[in-house]
Amino acid sequence: MATIPADVLGLPKPAWAADDVAMLYDMAHRFMSEEILPHYDGYEKNEIVDRAAWEKAGAAGLLCASIPEEYGGSGGTFAHESAIIEAIGHVGVDGFGIALHNAIVAPYILHYGSEEQKKKWLPKMATGELIGAIAMTEPGAGSDLQGVKTRAEKDGNQYRINGSKTFITNGQLANLVIVVTKTDPSKGAKGTSLIVVETDEVDGFERGRNLDKIGLKANDTSELFFNDVRVPTSNLLGQEEGQGFVQLMQQLPQERLEIGTGAIAMIERALAVTIDYVKDRKAFGKAILDFQNTQFKLAELKTEATIGRVFYNDCVARHISGGLDPVTASMAKYWLSDLQCKIVDECLQLFGGYGYMNEYPIARMYRDARVQRIYGGTNEIMKLLIARSL
C-alpha cells in the first residue's frame, strides 16, 4: 500500500504544525510504515493489533503525546496528537486504535483524575502497559448518553458495577476502561458518573465477542459485561458523583475533532492513490487522467479537500488556544466525515472494477470510512446540536 506525504494538497503548513509537530509527524509516519504496515494485513485477518505493537508505539513516544512529562507523556498539545493520527491515516493503518487511547481516554484522566490517579495510570498508558477504552454505548443507548442503564452502587468503600456495553473500541485489549455509569438513576444526566475499571484487577468483568464489522477490521471492537464488578470508590473520576455527563460534554469537542483528523488524513490519501492510479491506468489508448471527466472530477475533489483541510487547520488552532466551541466541533465532525465518505466513493469510481477489489487500498478506505458518520455521535445528532445554535 502506498503512503503519502503530509503536503499532498500543496498547502503551507499552519502555525500549529511547527517544527516539533512536523518532526513528530515524520517519525510517526516512519514508525507506522516500518513497524505497523508490514503486519497490517495480518492484523486485519486476526481482527486485532498485537499488544506488542502498542508497546513499540509507547517506546517510540507515540502514546500520550499530549500528556505532561511528569505523568510519563511527551508534554505536547492536540497538535501533536493530530500529527500522529494523520500519519496513521496517510500510511493507511486506520485500525490501530491509539487515537482513542491518546486523544480521548487519557485526557479524561488528566483533566478529572486526582493526582494519585494520574500518577498511577497515565505513565502506564504512555508505555502501552495499560491500553485505554471508554465504555459509553450500550445496546439500548448510543448517541443518547442520558439513556445509559449501567449502574454503580456504593457498597462501603467500593462501587458495585452492573451492566453491559457494546461497540467498544480497543475492547479486547483494553485493561483500563472508563465506564459511563449511573450512580443515581433518579437524577437523569445529573446522576451519571465516570468510573475507571482496571480489568486485570477485578472479578466479574467479561469481554464478549470481537464484533464482526464492515470495516476497521484491525481494530478490536467488543461487547463488555460488568457483573457485580467491584472497584474502589477512589476510582471515581472527579471529586464527587454526578459529574460524568458534564465531563463527557466538556471532552466531546476534542473527540469530534479527532474524528475530523482521521477524515482529512484519509481524504488526502484517497486523492493521492487515485491520482497515481489514473496517471498509470489506460483506457481506449490513453491514460484515464487524460479524459476530461477525470480531470474535472479530481478538480472538484481536490478543491473540496482543500476547503476541508483549511477548516480543519483552523479548528485545531482554535482548540489549542481553548476556543473550539462544541458547535464548531460538531460541524467539523459531521462535515469532514461526510466529505470523507463522498471523496473516497468518488475516488473508488475512478478505479473502475479494481476499486472494488480488496487488494487496492481504496477498497479498504471505502469500508473503513463509513463508521465515521456514526461514532462520536451520529452526524444527524451533530446537525441537531448545530441547529440549536441558530
Image (cartoon, rainbow, N blue to C red):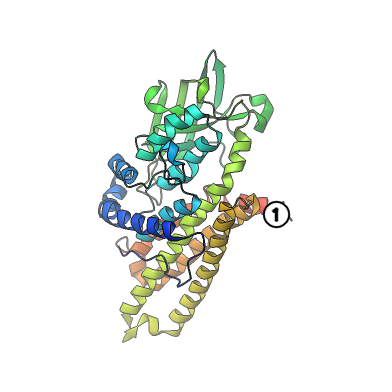
Residue 323 percent location from the top left of the image: 63, 52
Provide the residue designation for mark 1.
387
Residue 125 percent location from the top left of the image: 40, 37
**Badge 1 density bin: few <14, some 14–19, many ≥20, Cα 10 Å:** few
Query: Seen in the image, is 53 located left or right of residue 269?
Result: left
Pick the quarter of the image with the N terminus. bottom left
Farthest residue in the top direction? Answer: 156
| Residue 137 in sight from this viewpoint | no
Residue 266 percent location from the top left of the image: 43, 61
Residue 368 percent location from the top left of the image: 42, 55
Q: Is residue 158 above or below residue 239?
A: above
Given residues 345 and 310, the one toward you in this image is: 310
Q: Is residue 366 above or below residue 211?
A: below
Given residues 64 and 176, the one toward you in this image is: 64
Q: Is residue 66 above or below residue 332?
A: above
Farthest residue in the right direction? Answer: 390
Query: Seen in the image, is 322 located left or right of residue 102?
Result: right
Q: What's the residue at 42%, 27% (across, down)? A: 198
Instruction: Give the residue type at disc 1.
Output: Ala
Q: Quadrant of residue 353?
A: bottom left
- Give the SS element for disc 1: helix
Given residues 36 and 315, the one toward you in this image is: 315
- What is the number of callouts on the image? 1
Pick the quarter of the image with the C terminus. bottom right
Q: What's the residue at 39%, 23% (across, down)? A: 201
Q: Quadrant of residue 210?
A: top left
Q: What's the residue at 52%, 73% (across, down)? A: 303
| Residue 319 in sight from this viewpoint | yes
